[in-house]
Amino acid sequence: MDRLHTMSEKEIKKTEMMSQLAEKQITQQMAAKHLGISVRQVKRLWNQYQKLGAEGLINKSRGKPSHNQLDEELKKKVIDLILERYRDFGPTLATEKLKEVHGIKISDESVRKIMIAEGLWKHRRKRKLKVFQMRERRACFGELVQIDGSDYDWFEGRSPRCTLLVFVDDATGRLVELWFVPHESFFGYCEAARHYFERYGKPGAFYSDKHGIFHINHPNATSGDGMTDFGRAMSELGVEIICANTPQAKGRVERANKTLQDRLTKELRLCNISTPEEANQWLPEFMKDYNNRFATTPRSDLDFHIPLSETDNFDLILCRKETRTLSKNLTFQYRKTIYQIHVDRPTYAMRNTVVSVLEKPDHEVIVLYNNRPIRFDVYYQQQKQAEVVPSKSIDQALINASKAHTPPPDHPWRKFNLKSNAPSKGDILTLSI
């Protein structure tokens, strides 16, 4: 009785070559050329064909379990750990944690198959790629640093939503600074930049988007020197600022943001870190591990950073700085507030004098004349008008506005006796004063 055999396309082709070889239509060298194998291998196949016929060309391992398959006990242990601790992790990150935390050495592809079988991971469809102009990495470490802010729920509800400022070196892909702030702001970037400068020195240039912190976006802006506060500070330090037209242009920091939103969020959870203050203390440890995994070697061994000098006074540079002209009464206005200058010399000597006004991160104001601080008093503060807020800072502005006013003790609503007049379900709320 004839038996039914399952053969692959390659095995069917081999059978056809052996049949022609048996009829002496081709030589062994011709068969080897058609099959893309050596003559020695053709001889082995010919011997099997002569002994067993077409059945001798079928793979003997078909239908049998693989010798390299995972041990069932190990596979069960991996599944239990993934379901218990790493349910929302990606296969690559889960593989790293299984090795580092639990000492289980397993390939990421095996973990991916397990997670797909358990319904924890799905095959990702390949998107149609958009073609952008390729830009080669810079040659030297510190030659160009890409900076950006990533607004995300980093602490998964354990702490209010905040922003992570990310500094990525273009030549190596290294994280050179991470810093949590409530939202993207001038003082937030100044603080992160100060940490970076103190660690590495001054880079050649910063590469950013066109946020109002880095670029004046008002088309009709004519006053001032055409630079933002951050641009002025970097100019004093000799660091150039370059703004990208598209997110793809600064793709290294954008891709780092996506990776951090996956990895950093889960690392914060595993380390039981729930506040930005705790995270800022721990971030250098995370950056070291991240750079060991993903950083590349630059084409040049030259470090492009410029060491800090004695004239780099960050307290007087990384702050808001504007100039004002004193009136006849030695007063000037800054941010809806009138300041009165005190001098020991005759007052007429200081009329129409230009002074520098510095505002520190804690909103402390310093007035400089000839680079020396002078005394002053707050003379008058105007009522606040509508504030101009960037779109990225609207959420933070609304949060601050809700906390800005506390009703006084004699406010009418404090007299409401809500407990004694609590309405029953379905009643209209009535309050007695």
Image: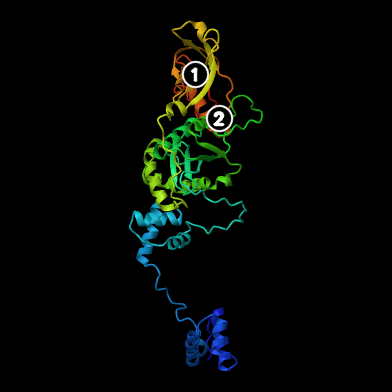
Task: Determine which residue is flagged by label 1.
Answer: 413
Q: Nearer the viewer, mark 2 or mark 1?
A: 2
| Viewer-closest of 10 and 433 | 10
Tell me which residue sits at (48%, 15%) in the image: 411
When asked about the image quadrant of residue 374, the answer is top left
| Viewer-closest of 315 and 400 | 315
Residue 221 in the image: state x and y as whole percent: 64, 27
Vertical arrangement, residue 340 with respect to residue 259, above or below:
above
Residue 337 in the image: state x and y as whole percent: 52, 16
Tell me which residue sits at (47%, 41%) in the image: 166
Q: Is residue 356 visible?
A: yes
SS type, badge 2: loop
The residue under label 2 is which amino acid type? Thr
Asked whether disc 2 touches disc 1, contact meaning CB atoms under 8 Å apart, the reply is: no
Q: Residue at the right extreme?
A: 220
Q: Residues within 10 Å of mark 2 (few under 14, many from 20)?
A: some
Task: Determine which residue is flagged by label 2.
Answer: 228
Circle number at residue 307: none
SS type, badge 1: helix
